[in-house]
């Protein structure tokens, strides 16, 4: 009988049924450890956390043997494209308050995805000590930012910007901010069915040119465009707040996690909102959703119910940081003062998901990222910003044409 019981337990683990729950995530390092703490706090559950990294999309197609029961998806586009593989959410998990951010991104009618994590991605982080020592102030407009960069180059001995070009999503996020916050109508047009030639329209080419102008200025990027191409996201944050080689980095809220790991003094951390055009403009966001794969189990549904509660992410918020709960009922007093302000920003402003989150468009998730890496490489090789921007716009047309 004991052998039979043990065999049944192993079968449950292998098939992902019974009381055992496999959870697939894209997170790694500190974020992976943070989510493990979220699961540990629940207690009493038999779970296995499986890091898929950038291959998280394959978790939805896993065979029955070893398949995950719950998948944390970093792009809402995965949900609409895989509804036939997903189980509906348990009753009373979805909140009407989620509709403001997520309704346009998810299938209408029955709910298949639980919003879990939000990230404000229109944030520029800066080192207060550099600004205060040289009489500098955060910019209010794009022109102000260009002038600020010149002042930093002239006065401080550090570069204005750090950039993690090896992580293409950082480049795509920078471009998305320029386009959305200056040319909102053209941004929205890119997210609707459109002709590929829209990439060479005036507004979109202007956005490419603005980005190329800033990145291409000699001395603007810490280590120059060459090193920016080999730097990953955490390295870019550390260029500002650990190695003191740059004054600013444009990065989502989870940059705070890196700062906490290296014990950066909060007194030296400042933020400003990515500059916009003359009118109020939406903010760029990203987010993570939890889905249940078919066939589901009562244990998986129970875990989803727990993760939908306001207090579930508290260990991540308090111990690791860089996390804004998608659940609006999560007590904001758990956030650091900086994240409390940024969470309020998301609540009070119009938002759009980043261009890289729109799967099935833009030549796939990697298309825009690859084109911007090529543009940065061209700048490193000495191309004029105007010609590098023009080449990037035409490369996006080719990317979409091939995708079709």
Image (tube, rainbow, N blue to C red):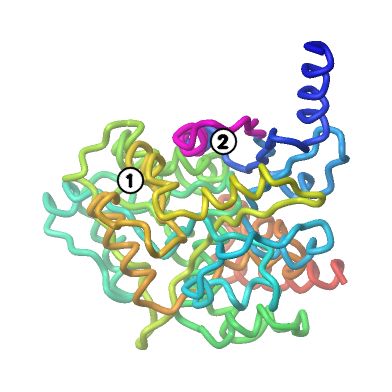
Is 340 rendered above or below residue 300?
Answer: below
User: Which residue in the structure is indicated by mark 2?
Assistant: 28
Q: Quadrant of the N terminus?
A: top right
Q: Position of residue 236 (x, y in %)?
A: 43, 43
- Judge whether residue 46 is colored magenta: yes
In the foreground, 5 or 326: 5
Look at mark 1 in the image and give the residue it sits on.
246
Please provide percent x and percent y for residue 299. 66, 42
**What crowding class fits label 1: few (fewer than 14 Cα within 10 Å), some (14-19), or many (20 or more)?**
many
In which quadrant will I find the C terminus?
A: bottom right
Mark 1 to mark 2 CA distance (whole Å): 26 Å
What residue is at 43 percent from the left and 79 percent from the top?
350
From the top left corner, tell me how far across and down residue 88 is, in percent: 71, 62
In the image, is 273 to the left or to the right of 287?
left
Point 40% across, 65% down: residue: 328
Question: Judging from the image, what secondary structure is the residue with disc 2 in?
Answer: loop
- For the residue carrying disc 2, how many other residues have a C-alpha within 10 Å: few (<14), some (14-19), or many (20+)? some
Q: Is residue 112 visible?
A: yes
Q: Which residues are magenta?
A: 34-50
Q: Nearer the viewer, mark 1 or mark 2?
A: 2
Residue 32, above or below 79: above
Q: Residue at x 47, y 73 (%)?
A: 97
Residue lying at 69% horizontally and 63% vertically, measured from the top left: 112
Residue 91 magenta-highlighted: no
């Amino acid at each position: 009988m004991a052998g039979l019981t043990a065999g049944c337990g192993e079968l449950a683990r292998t098939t992902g049924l019974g009381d055992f729950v496999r959870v697939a995530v894209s997170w790694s390092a500190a974020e992976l450890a943070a989510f493990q703490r979220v699961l540990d706090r629940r207690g009493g559950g038999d779970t296995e956390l499986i890091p898929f990294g950038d291959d998280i999309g394959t978790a939805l197609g896993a065979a029955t043997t070893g398949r995950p029961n719950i998948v944390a998806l970093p792009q809402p586009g995965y949900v609409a494209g895989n509804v036939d593989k997903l189980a509906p959410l348990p009753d009373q998990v979805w909140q009407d308050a989620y509709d403001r951010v997520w309704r346009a991104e998810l299938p209408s009618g029955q709910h298949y995805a639980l919003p879990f994590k939000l990230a404000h991605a229109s944030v520029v982080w800066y080192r207060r000590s550099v600004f205060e020592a040289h009489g500098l102030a955060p910019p209010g407009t794009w022109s102000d930012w260009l002038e600020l960069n010149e002042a930093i180059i002239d006065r401080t001995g550090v570069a204005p910007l750090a950039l993690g070009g090896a992580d293409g999503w950082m480049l795509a996020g920078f471009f998305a901010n320029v386009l959305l916050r200056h040319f909102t109508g053209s941004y929205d047009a890119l997210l609707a069915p459109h002709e590929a030639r829209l990439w060479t329209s005036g507004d979109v080419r202007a956005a490419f040119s603005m980005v190329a102008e800033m990145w291409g200025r000699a001395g603007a990027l810490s280590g120059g465009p060459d090193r920016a191409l080999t730097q990953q996201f955490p390295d870019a944050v550390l260029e500002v707040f650990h190695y003191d080689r740059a004054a600013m980095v444009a990065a989502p809220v989870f940059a705070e996690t890196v700062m906490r790991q290296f014990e950066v003094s909060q007194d030296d951390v400042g933020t400003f909102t990515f500059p916009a055009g003359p009118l109020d403009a939406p903010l760029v966001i990203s987010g993570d959703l939890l889905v249940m794969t078919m066939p589901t189990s009562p244990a998986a549904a129970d875990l989803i119910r727990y993760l939908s509660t306001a207090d579930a992410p508290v260990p991540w918020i308090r111990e690791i940081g860089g996390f804004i709960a998608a659940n609006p009922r999560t007590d904001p007093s758990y956030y650091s003062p900086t994240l409390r302000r940024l969470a309020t920003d998301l609540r009070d402003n119009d938002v759009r998901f980043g261009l890289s989150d729109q799967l099935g468009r833009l030549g796939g998730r990697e298309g825009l990222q690859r084109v911007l890496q090529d543009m940065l490489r061209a700048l490193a090789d000495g191309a004029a910003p105007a010609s590098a921007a023009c080449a990037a716009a035409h490369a996006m047309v080719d990317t979409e044409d091939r995708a079709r």
